[in-house]
Amino acid sequence: MAEQERALDFIEATHLWSQHAQFVSRAEGAPNPFRAIYGVEAQQGGVWDVMTRFHTICERLQLPFHVSTSVEVNPATGDMAVAFGAPEPTQFPTAVPDSRGHARDCTGKRAQWAAAYALRLAALLANIGFAVNTGIIGVTVIARAGEPDGQTLFSLGFNRVDFHFATAKLFVDGTIDDAKFDADPAQLLAAFDVDSARVEFDADGWFAPTEDPELPESLRELRTPLGEDARELPDSLKSLLRADRVCDLDIADRASLSIRDIHQIAQENADSPVTAVVELGGALTTLKRELSVSTSIRQPLYCEREALRLLVSEAAGDAATRYRTVPGAIAAVRSELARFDMKLGQLDDALRELQELQRISPTSVQGGIAEAMAYSMAGDTARAVESIRQALMLAVVPDEVAFLYCLLGQMFAMASEIETAIDCYYVASTVGVQTEYTGVGRQAMEALLAQIGAARDGQDGHQGERSFTATVDARPTAPSREHALGSLQAAGIPIAPTQSVIQTLTRAAMMLTDAGVPLAAYDGVEILAEYSAEPTLLWMCRALQEGAGCAR
């Protein structure tokens, strides 16, 4: 009986499309909670606003299946494409109760039922597309098997005017909920007024896979590889990103030697530092010869990932500064040379290499980390701490932020500043939602707390004042995050990512999204999502990277 009740509930849930459309109508004018994040506000009606508004409405729909989507849009031309994952026929019930309550086998009808569901959902998604921005005049909806990047099942092209006068009326008068379409999805399709359709049904009534539709040029150009995109950037982005064209944001290099090649040279000569320095020097000479002479007036720039290219305004220079891409292999050579110089006891030479590494990668913290470790190996803890402090001023990648606090905790522990070390380890364990060093920071903090507890047990009941909390039996426990952050700030330790850095990253990602350069924006959005674990930002990252999944 319970199974039949569930089947009845499912049937009812698959025939509430007019109610879903009513919800969309109510939601379209609601404030967008993701238009402003981290204190930065996106342009109203821009790409960021439209995409996040679209996803917010989709997530609030009460559908029998969660709808997974990916979107790309150009509000300036009014074009939008929506890819969504259609549930498979096997996800539908095999039996439903008849009028007398007896189970009726419907295994052979599931394909048609699922096809009708997918077509109804496609029309609803087009409705949402038109609702989120009045400037959207055309929506292409692409159904794929299971997920937005699955096999293409069908595509429908809607225009605003015809949708309003025909398809939308199916929602308004409830026709779209008519159960007759469950057994005849082709009849439902015929009721839609579409500009284009790539739909074929197989013998069972499900969809025969088809090719992707050809999207408007304004959407296809969003998928142009950065290195090939010669479009001029808006003036506001030119100054923020210190670039003139989209291709200037490309961080890929075409050097003859890769980072892996450099590490291989270092590994092969691990037991002979002198030979390693000679071999690495030769590699550096080769790489320098390959650099274009015509770009010599530009500042060198190596970025490990796209998001770091968005932070150049935090580095030395001004709005007029321009960059030339430095191969990753050159950065790897500098790092390896510094490591071997340390093995040879040549601290000054190592520091010069690391200073050069930081000069060519001003938005990266890797040079600062290596510098801190070099000072630590030389026994200069004060300078090591200062190097970490400087790195924290720029750090934004969660794993790197957490590692820096772990390293800082180690430095303070070595200096017997245990309470500050505990604060560092605690903060390391709470960076973002989860990092590679979450557990490391937690374990190191607990070890120091245990060490304090053991030392206290050895005293004659004397209890000194402690900044950390204590349990009823006076065993030391972890500080609160608020206390740990306050203590570090009081000690002159930056709280990373700093407000300036996170807002610069947010502003650049939003502006690039609105400017129609998603391939330069998505990595920055990924970092923002790693701090909040907000589903909409995680969705934005994937949507910016993949779009509607159609070939360019």
Image (cartoon, grey):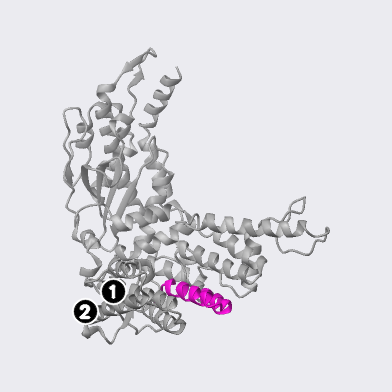
Q: What x and y, as percent, mark residue 155? A: 21, 44
Work out which residue is located at the far bottom of the displayed protein and give it. Answer: 297
Query: How far from the left and from the top, in percent, is residue 414?
Result: 61, 69
Which sits in the foreground, 309 or 155?
309
The C terminus: image quadrant: bottom left
Magenta residue span: 362-388
Q: Which residue in the structure is indicated by mark 2?
A: 290
Q: Which residue in the protein does label 1 denote?
A: 327
Residue 529 tag number: none
Q: Overall secondary structure of the magenta stretch?
A: helix
Q: Quadrant of residue 108?
A: top left
* Left or right of 398, for residue 287: left
Contact between marks 2 and 1 (CB within 8 A): the answer is: yes
- What is the crowding at mark 2: few (fewer than 14 residues within 10 Å), some, or many (at least 20)? few
Position of the N terminus by quadrant:
top left
Q: Which residue is drawn at the image coordinates 77% and 58% (left, top)?
A: 458
Looking at the rendering, which quadrant does residue 143 occupy?
top left
* Residue 345 among those drawn in magenta: no
Tell me the quarter of the picture where residue 367 sits: bottom left
